[in-house]
């Protein structure tokens, strides 16, 4: 949900850039001796649509924040779950170390037996 | 009481400020763009000479274009401020993110523990067979310590060594008990790496 809103704001940033680009294209086209009317119309429609989209999206976001924002800081945390998970990983690592020792012990014993047989 | 009233008002004021900035910037873009288009219209000659009028129009268009760019930049800053405000104050999404993260961490922990438990069960069977093999082999002497006792003593020596090494900085106490040198097989068979690795 948070990612959706942040992604929407990133799209708004792209729309703002599109607004400026359309305005620049229209002025550039006006500076020419022969204007391409259809191109200018398309750019103008895109400019107006982008401006209205930017305004509507940002108004919606501000309205949503007016409803959900409080004056208090958020005090939630994932510390306990993260600590428990870290301890579980430490247990697994410890078991791996001990199994390694057991394996080396078995190898040493086998080598001794082979030496005794030879 | 007064402090509680101040904080929500600042948030409310901030959001009203955001609204105002949004309206002002959008209006600036639209007005300046409209005026640029109007200025581009070719008109009949007025009292001002053509070069002067052209220069004036040129300067006006520059200023209005700069205003449009400034308003666009201000909108980008507004979006950045809104993103920051959203991350800090959008409690529903923060709660969702925290609960999702907790769920993932707990599932990882449970999976880890479940695998460790199954590993423990399998290793217990193998260790039983290893002990059977060890106690029935020719290497085991009846005077030797049982594996569990050797393991317990090794752990107590290891803890004693860690406290001594912090004061002496050497590991000579590792070979303290003489029985360890005469019967290296205790540690070799129980915990071979301890005696193999020591100098």
Image (cartoon, grey):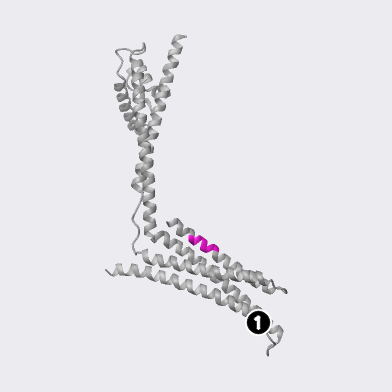
Which residue lies most toward the bottom here?
A: B47
Question: Residue B72: in sight, yes or no?
Answer: no
- Farthest left residue in view: B1
Judging depth in this view, the residue of B12 and B97 nearest the camera is B97
The residue that disc 1 covers is B56
Span colored in magenta: A8-14
- The quadrant holding residue B123 is top left
Q: Is residue B23 above or below residue B139?
A: below
Chief secondary structure of the magenta portion: helix
Considering depth in this image, is B108 or B191 the residue closer to the camera?
B108
Most extreme residue toward the top is A118
Q: Position of residue B107 (x, y in %)?
A: 37, 42
Q: Residue B31 placed where, x, y %?
A: 55, 77
Image spot of residue A16 (x, y percent): 54, 66
Q: Residue A66 sits in which quadrant? A: bottom left
At mark 1, the secondary structure is helix
- Which image quadrant for residue B157? top left
The residue located at (30%, 22%) in the rendering is: B148
Can residue A54 be seen at all in this image of the molecule? Answer: yes
Taking the magenta stretch, the answer to whether it contains residue B97 is no
Rate crowding at label 1 as few (under 14), some (14 to 19) or many (20 or more) other CA atoms within 10 Å. some
Q: Residue at x 30, y 18 (%)?
A: B146
- Which residue is at a point 69% across and 74% down the rendered structure image? A31
Q: Quadrant of the N terminus of chain A?
A: bottom left
**A68 or A53, nearer to the observer:** A53
Q: Nearer the viewer, residue A52 or B102?
A: A52
Q: Please, which chain is the residue tagged with disc 1 on?
A: B
Residue B163 appears left or right of A50:
left
């Amino acid at each position: 949900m948070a990612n959706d809103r942040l992604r929407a704001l990133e799209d708004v940033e792209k729309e703002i850039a599109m607004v400026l680009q359309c305005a620049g294209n229209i002025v550039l086209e006006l500076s020419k001796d022969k204007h391409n009317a259809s191109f200018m119309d398309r750019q103008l429609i895109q400019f107006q649509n982008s401006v209205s989209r930017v305004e509507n999206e940002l108004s919606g976001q501000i309205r949503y924040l007016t409803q959900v924002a409080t004056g208090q800081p958020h005090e939630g945390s994932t510390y306990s779950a993260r600590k428990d998970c870290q301890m579980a990983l430490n247990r697994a690592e410890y078991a791996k170390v001990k199994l390694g020792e057991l394996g080396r012990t078995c190898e040493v014993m086998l080598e001794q037996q082979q030496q005794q047989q030879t | 009481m007064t402090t509680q009233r101040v904080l929500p008002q600042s948030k409310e004021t901030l959001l009203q400020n955001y609204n105002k900035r949004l309206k002002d910037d959008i209006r600036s873009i639209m007005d300046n763009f409209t005026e640029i288009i109007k200025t581009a219209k070719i008109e009949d000659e007025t009292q001002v000479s053509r070069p002067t009028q052209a220069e004036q129009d040129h300067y006006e268009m520059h200023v209005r274009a700069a205003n449009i760019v400034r308003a666009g930049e201000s909108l980008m800053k507004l979006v950045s401020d809104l993103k920051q405000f959203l991350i800090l104050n959008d409690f529903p999404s923060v709660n969702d993110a925290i609960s999702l993260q907790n769920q993932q961490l707990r599932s990882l922990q449970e999976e880890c523990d479940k695998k460790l438990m199954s590993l423990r069960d399998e290793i217990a069977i193998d260790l039983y067979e290893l002990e059977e093999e060890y106690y029935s082999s020719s290497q085991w002497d009846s005077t030797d310590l049982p594996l569990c006792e050797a393991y317990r003593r090794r752990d107590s020596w290891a803890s004693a060594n860690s406290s001594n090494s912090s004061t002496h900085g050497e590991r000579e106490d590792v070979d303290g008990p003489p029985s360890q040198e005469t019967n290296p097989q205790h540690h070799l068979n129980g915990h071979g790496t301890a005696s193999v690795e020591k100098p």
